[in-house]
Image (cartoon, grey):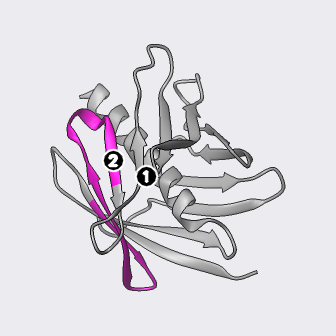
Amino acid sequence: MKINQYVIESKGVITKRYKIYKEKSLLLKVNGGFFLKEMKINDTDGNEVMRIRRPFSPFKMKFEIIVNDEVRGTIIADKNPLSNDLTVDTLVGLFFVEGNFWANEFTIEDAHKQIAKISRKRFSSKRYGVAILQGQDELFIMGIVMAIEMMIQVNRRRKS
């Protein structure tokens, strides 16, 4: 089993911007919108490859992964306010995200095995790592990772 490693760097306060590196090469750029309603994921040439949207949902936090104007996955946060677990409903099946209480460690699993791990235990407050099992859809998993980032940012703003 081979694992691909990624580093995510963030910049900005009001509107966050991210750069995603795969083995020290820039892979994707991400721009967050105002009020944390949407993130646009672009390739290195600036072409949009995916959007993460947070539609209005009064009772639970929900995100949509959109590729070519088609919803490819819906991410729903656990109703338990002390949990950082998510369910990802996609065209190819369900994925499950388990996060610890501090929201600094996450695992992404399909029905059979762990396919990715996110470690937000940072040496720097602006960088963290993602490991993805080779053979997985790295772009889609990065969409899940950015939805988790949106969830964390929304929760932080709600607390302040």
Q: Where residue 39 is drawn, which disc sits there?
A: 2
Q: Residue furthest bottom?
A: 24
Which residue occupies 55% across, 38% down?
Answer: 84
Marks 1, 2: nearer the viewer = 2
- The answer to whether residue 133 is left or right of residue 99 is right
Q: Which mark is residue 146?
A: 1
State left or right for residue 151 relative to residue 97.
left
Kind of residue at disc 2: Met
* Mark 2 secondary-structure assignment: strand
Q: Is residue 151 above or below residue 117?
A: above
Mark 1: which amino acid? Answer: Met
Residue 45: percent from left, percent from top: 28, 74
In the image, the segment drawn in magenta is 18-40
> Marks 2 and 1: in contact by CB < 8 Å?
yes
Dot 1, how many residues are within 10 Å of its Cα: few (below 14), some (14-19), or many (20+)?
Answer: many
Kindly indicate the quadrant of the structure image that contains residue 43.
bottom left
Q: Which of the numbered marks, if any, corresponds to residue 25?
A: none
**SS of the residue under disc 1:** helix
Residue located 30% across and 26% down the image: 158
Question: Looking at this view, is 55 or 16 the one in front?
Answer: 55
Looking at the image, which is closer to me, 78 or 66? Answer: 66
The one of 52 and 99 positioned closer to us in this rendering: 52
Query: Is any part of residue 51 visible from this angle?
Result: yes
Quarter of the picture holding the C terminus: top left
Give the position of the N terminus as an image quadrant: bottom right
| Mark 2 closeness class: few <14, some 14–19, many ≥20 residues within 10 Å | many
Q: Residue at x 40, y 48 (%)?
A: 51
